[in-house]
Amino acid sequence: MRIIAGEWRRRLLKAPPGEATRPTADRTRETLFNMLASRLGDFEGLAVADLFAGSGALGLEALSRGAATCLFVEQDAAAIRALRANIAALRAQTRGSVQASSVLSLPQAKAPYDLLLLDPPYGSGAGAVALDRLTRLGWIGEATWIALETAKDEPARVKALEIEAERTVGSARLTLLRLPR
C-alpha cells in the first residue's frame, strides 16, 4: 500500500496486522481521488476527516495532495498503532490528528468539514448510520463532499444526502454524496 500522488507520492504505508482492517486498495483509492479531483479541482487547504480510518491511507492521500488538516477517527488498537506510525513516518503530526473512538460516538462539530472520507466495514451499514448522525451533528455543510466506500453490492443510501456519483472498482463501490442543493 502506497500514497498515489502529491507530496508523499510512492511512499509506503503500514497496514495493521490481522483481518480486522481492510485497507483500500491502491487502484480503488486512485479512482476515488480522481472522482474527487474532477469535482473539487484540488485539495489545497481542505479540512478533511477520515472516518473508520484504519491505516489512514485515505486521509494521508488527501494530505499528500494539499489538504490543510485531517482528523483520523479509528477505534481498533492495532489500526491506531499503524495509523500513528504512518503519520510519524510522513512527518504529518502538525496536520493530522488521531481520535481513538467510534465514529458513532463523535460529538457535535465546531464547523462542517470540507471532505469526509468513510471506509466502514463492508456489509455493516455503519457508513449510512454514521452519515445520518454526523449530518445532525453539523459535520456536513452545504459545501461538504462525502466519499463512502462500501461493498459493490451494498447500497449507499442516506436519507439527508444525495448521490452525486457512483463507481464500482473490484469488490468496492465508491459513492460521492452531498446535501441536496
Image (cartoon, grey):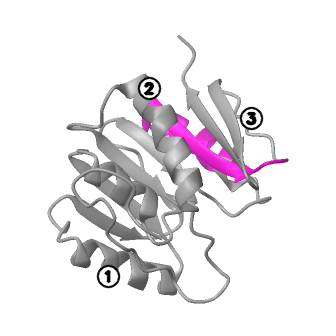
As measured in the structure, the alpha-carbon distance from the residue carrying label 3 to the one carrying label 1 is 34 Å
Please tell me which residue is depicted at 23% across the width and 77% down the height of the picture: 88
Q: Which residue is mark 3?
A: 157
How packed mark 3 is, by other alpha carbons closer than 10 Å (few <14, some 14-19, many 20 or more), is some
The front one of 178 and 58 is 58
Residue type at tag 1: Ala
Q: Nearer the viewer, mark 1 or mark 2?
A: 2
Q: Position of residue 122 (x, y in %)?
A: 74, 60
First reached walking from the N terminus: tag 1 or tag 2:
2
How packed mark 1 is, by other alpha carbons closer than 10 Å (few <14, some 14-19, many 20 or more), is some
Q: Which residue is mark 1?
A: 85
Q: Residue furthest front?
A: 10
Residue type at tag 3: Arg
Residue type at tag 2: Ser
Q: Position of residue 171 (x, y in %)?
A: 76, 56
Tag of residue 38: 2
Q: Position of residue 41 (x, y in %)?
A: 33, 26
Q: Based on the picture, tell me whether residue 58 belongs to the magenta stretch.
A: no
How packed mark 2 is, by other alpha carbons closer than 10 Å (few <14, some 14-19, many 20 or more), is few
Tag of residue 43: none
